[in-house]
Image: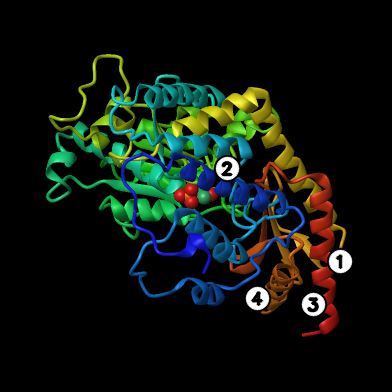
Amino acid sequence: MNDLSRPRELKTGTAGWKSEHDAMLRQAAERAMSFRRALDSRPQKPARSFAEMRESFIAPLPEEGSDGRFVIEELAALAEPGLAAMTGPRFFGWVMGASHPIGIAADWLTSAWGQNCGGHTVTPAAAACEEAAANWLLDLLDLPRDASVGFVTGATVANFTCLAAARGELLRRVGWDVDANGLFGAPTIRVIIGEEAHASVFSALQFLGLGYERVIRIPTDAMGRMRIDEFESAMSQGDQPTIVIAQAGHINTGAFDPILRIAKIAHRGNAWVHVDGAFGLWARACPSTALLATGIETADSWATDGHKWLQLPYDCGFAIVRNAEAHRRSMAITASYLPAVAAGERNPSHYVPELSRRARGFAAWAMIRALGRRGVAQLVAHHCGIARRMAQALRQEAGIRVLNEVELNQVVVRFGGDDPADDILTSKVIARIQADGTCFAAGAQWKGLWIMRLSVTSWATSEADADRSVAAIIGAWRAVQAEGT
Ligand SMILES: *Cc1c(COP(=O)(O)O)cnc(C)c1O
């Protein structure tokens, strides 16, 4: 037992321990930096399994406290073998983003500053910085400049927040105050949604009492886009208050619903159009992809992530609502002890479900400030270019097929034929790729087939990383074929 590991009492008051705390913070920063430095050379997978990590971590509650420096060292030593390389340059699993160092640095300051965003006049810096980041965001994504923006944990909660505003506003129009009276006895809301909407949107409907089953699901085309004829016919059957949920960026294919046409038809029926654009909305920030996402600005609300394409650290998402008043009405918490809001002032807590939360605006501001409009556009174009490069190289290999039109950053890969019995081949290739660790990719069920999905979302991924990963994927496929079935 070294000196630091001896039981300690928690010290209160600031006398005497300032230098100890500085040393601990520096030590944490050192640990963090050495982890990041090793990301490129280490396998793009955790060294230890979940079961092994449980062995490391699960222990009886300590009776006595320990020195902070010892605890931080112990935490890092225990955790590091079980950390995934999610911010690594060859990690293509799900749609993750990769925490750019600029966002991390701003996030460290945010934690150290410890500002609670519950009141704008109490923490003027946090509130003003968030407002500035919100304005920049609307400019980057070319959405109505007077839309409101809530800084939430991610697209799931952004979807929830936007749909809460939609629910409240649609019912208010027919004389029902859902915020005060709930849904008991309320007029019925119809929800129309694409069959291949992201699972988190269905969760949002679940949280809102709208139900994930009692929705009208619109069939999709080969790329997973809502079929406009089917949508139009569903829309015409009934005239109750309606929420239409469209998607910008399909989780597998990256495809966009035809939102301009959807919104035109929906608005004729006074429906509220919500867009889940967790990553796809960022196509609007890049001239070479903006065409995919034209017309999205005509919707009524938009959910997107900061921790995906913008490379912010977790957790950060944005709930954007055209009707700021409806947004605020559905979220604002008021109490006598909370600061009043003067005309023209924005209180960050009025647009999110939480009262106390970290000041997410600092990291968002820093990341956008560092990239600028041009940097964001380059990032989007770069990821799309890498996706096309990987798709093209994979297509050259016999037995590997790319099933989607690679318009954005997503590549859908199938190994072997279309017979569902061939699913095993794709599963085996994925297992080999993951065991090898050169890159990371994961599988999904899509259109009745097991597929491998590549999502290019890390600022760190270079063309060399893409080529190295493609070689590893082709190597895994050849090995699977060689072992026979
Ligand atoms: C990632 C994603 C979500 C969920 O976002 P979280 O940040 O994980 O909450 C929703 N929709 C789509 C299309 C996504 O890609």
Counting residues from the N terminus, which is met first, the one under dot 2 or under dot 4? Answer: 2
Cα distance between the residues tagged 4 and 3: 17 Å
- Farthest-out residue, top: 343
Instruction: Judge the density around disc 1: few (<14), some (14-19), many (≥20) Cα neighbours within 10 Å.
Output: few
Q: What's the amino acid at mark 3?
A: Val
Counting residues from the N terminus, which is met first, the one under dot 2 or under dot 1? Answer: 2
Q: What's the amino acid at mark 2?
A: Phe
**Mark on residue 480?**
3
Image check: 409 left or right of 115?
A: right
Dot 4 corresponds to which residue?
A: 420
**Mark on residue 398?**
1
**Where residue 472 appears, x then y in whole percent?**
81, 63
Residue 48 appears in the rendering? yes
Counting residues from the N terminus, which is met first, the one under dot 3 or under dot 1? Answer: 1
What SS does tag 2 mark?
loop
Q: What's the amino acid at mark 1?
A: Ala
Residue 319's place in the image compared with 70, above or below, is above
State which mark lies toward you, 1 or 4.
1
Dot 2 corresponds to which residue?
A: 256
What SS does tag 4 mark?
helix
Cα distance between the residues tagged 3 and 1: 13 Å
Q: Relative to the observer, which residue lies in front, 267 or 212?
A: 212
Residue 479's place in the image compared with 375, above or below, is below
Asked if disc 2 is less than 8 Å from ligand 1, the answer is: no
Residue 109's place in the image compared with 419, above or below, is above
Counting residues from the N terminus, which is met first, the one under dot 4 or under dot 3? Answer: 4
